[in-house]
Amino acid sequence: MQRFDRPAEPANPYPDGMVEIAEVRYDTALKLLRLRDAPKMRDGEDADFIVAVPYGVSWRPDGGGWRQIVVPGGLITDLVSVPRLARIIVSRVGPYLEAAIVHDYLYIAWQDVPGRRARDADRRFADDLFRELMREARVNRALVALIFTTVRLFGAGPFRRRDAERYADLSDPEVTAQLPFRTKAR
């Protein structure tokens, strides 16, 4: 399977500075693909899944209009990034899964934007949007607080870490042969 370092049409999903998120919504269904020979993530743990088609959510800043974030098809994800020992409390799948996929994307998307570097404001936005999307999904308030606090305390390293193979090529015959539905070629 071919992998690459950015989507075909990179977009900047971040606001221009610190913002207060007033409202969020899920725009499309999340469709994930697991290949027979699942790709490996940078830390060696089985990545398991690829975002099969673009996945959209929208958010509105306080006093502003709606803005959409589209997670590109081909994003390689480990689902919810949870250390093995913590999986007793937070599993890799749950009502927070869709929010976690958006969060995964926002933690690497700065690498897709030419000339962009990892910025604290972008990480804060990713974490805040993650929290608001979990709330929108009606995740238990205590669990939202636990997950949000964890990403704030331990997310700086993963956010700043460069990853050269963030996306799978969805037009690769090895991938298309395993798709249960059709996707647009890139």
Image (cartoon, helix red, strand yellow):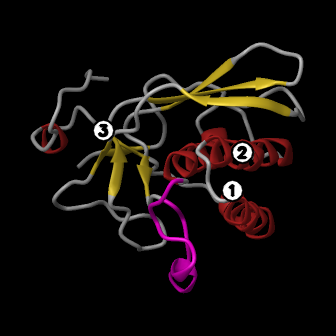
User: For the residues marked 2 and 1, what is the alpha-carbon distance in whole angstroms?
Assistant: 10 Å
> From which residue to which does the magenta span run?
80-95
Q: Are marks 2 and 1 in contact (CB under 8 Å)?
A: yes
Residue drawn at the location 48% of the way across and 22% of the way down: 9
Location of residue 116 with respect to 2 vertically, above or below: above
Question: Height in image: 77 above or below 68?
Answer: below
Which mark is first along the chain, 3 or 1? Answer: 1
Q: Secondary structure at mark 3?
A: loop
Residue topped by disc 1: 159
Q: Where does the image place residue 144, in percent across and percent down from the top left?
A: 70, 59
Residue 126 disc label: 2
Magenta stretch secondary structure, dominant? loop
- 83 magenta-colored: yes
Q: Secondary structure at mark 2?
A: helix
The kind of secondary structure element at disc 1 is helix
Give coordinates of residue 117: x percent, y percent.
75, 42
Residue at the top extreme?
Answer: 65
Instruction: Check residue 169 in the rendering and tell me which mark sits there, or answer none.
Output: 3
Type of amino acid under label 2: Ala
Real-space Cα separation, disc 1 to disc 3, in angstroms: 23 Å
Q: Which residue lies at the image location 33% right of the left edge and 61% below the top edge?
A: 48
Locate the C terminus by quadrant: top left
Q: Quadrant of residue 23?
A: top right
Say which amino acid is labelled 1: Phe
Instruction: Residue 114: give x, y in percent of width and height.
Output: 65, 30
